[in-house]
Image (cartoon, helix red, strand yellow):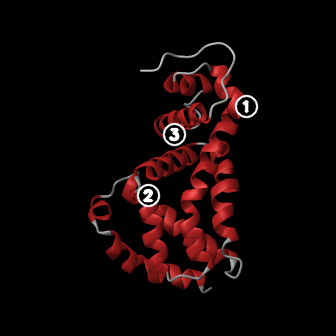
Amino acid sequence: MKKRQTGRPTGSESTRADILRAAREAFGSGGFDGTSLRSVAMKARVDPSTVIHFFGTKEGLFEALARDIVPALQPLINAIERRAPGTELVKIYLQIWEDEGNGYAMRALIRTSIGSERALALFKTTITKNILQALPSARPIGAELAMMQLIAIGLGRHIVRLPELSRTELGLIAKLVGPVLDRYLSL
């Protein structure tokens, strides 16, 4: 186990990654309001000044956590841009949740966003903006309904853990929900 660092903050990318991992865990269990920079620093085994060095504020840390998931969403964004069918969009989205690292980050972001207006605003400006920008030809209401359908499925399967939704194979979920997304995106 690493000894907690004190003194002048270090600038290594591995330290930054350790802080982001600790933040995912802290935000995922404590929400935005229940997480402090100090608690994240303790989990990452660094001095709080190191967290401030990298992220400035709790909002900055949460925003970095949200931005950190954007590359994992790129396959979904690419599929949206090429107008893939809804079944494919659902599969890609749920595969992001199924990935160990990305799924944990998604759960932390969703849990935190649900419990805090500030976190929700940060979530909207980082995650939803990237997805909605990939849908320029869809009417805004259709794009937002499609996005909320996906978020709800992730929430139900991986956070609420609804029994049937959690057990059902991704392909069947995609087959059932895909046509709904197609309908929304054709509005």
Q: Is residue 165 above or below residue 105?
A: below
Residue 20 placement: quadrant: top right
- Within 10 Å of disc 3 (Cα), the crowding (few <14, some 14-19, many 20+) is many
Name the residue rendered at 60%, 44% in the picture.
Answer: 65
For residue 4, above or below residue 26 = above
Q: Position of residue 50 (x, y in %)?
A: 65, 24
Quadrant location of the C terminus in the rendered image: bottom right
User: Which labelled disc corresponds to residue 75?
Assistant: none
**Residue 130 in the figure: left or right of residue 103:** right
Give the amino acid type for the residue marked by disc 1 in the picture. Gly
The type of residue carrying mark 2 is Trp
For label 3, the residue is 24
How many neighbours does mark 1 have within 10 angstroms: few (below 14), some (14-19), or many (20 or more)?
few
**What residue type is disc 3 on?**
Arg
- Compare marks 2 and 3 and give the one earlier in the sequence: 3
Which residue is denoted by mark 1 in the rendering? 56
Which sits in the foreground, 150 or 65? Answer: 65
Q: Which residue corresponds to the image point at 61% horizontal and 13% vertical from the top-left? A: 6
Residue topped by disc 2: 97
- Closest to the observer: 15 or 24? 15
SS of the residue under disc 3: helix
Q: Is residue 153 visible?
A: no
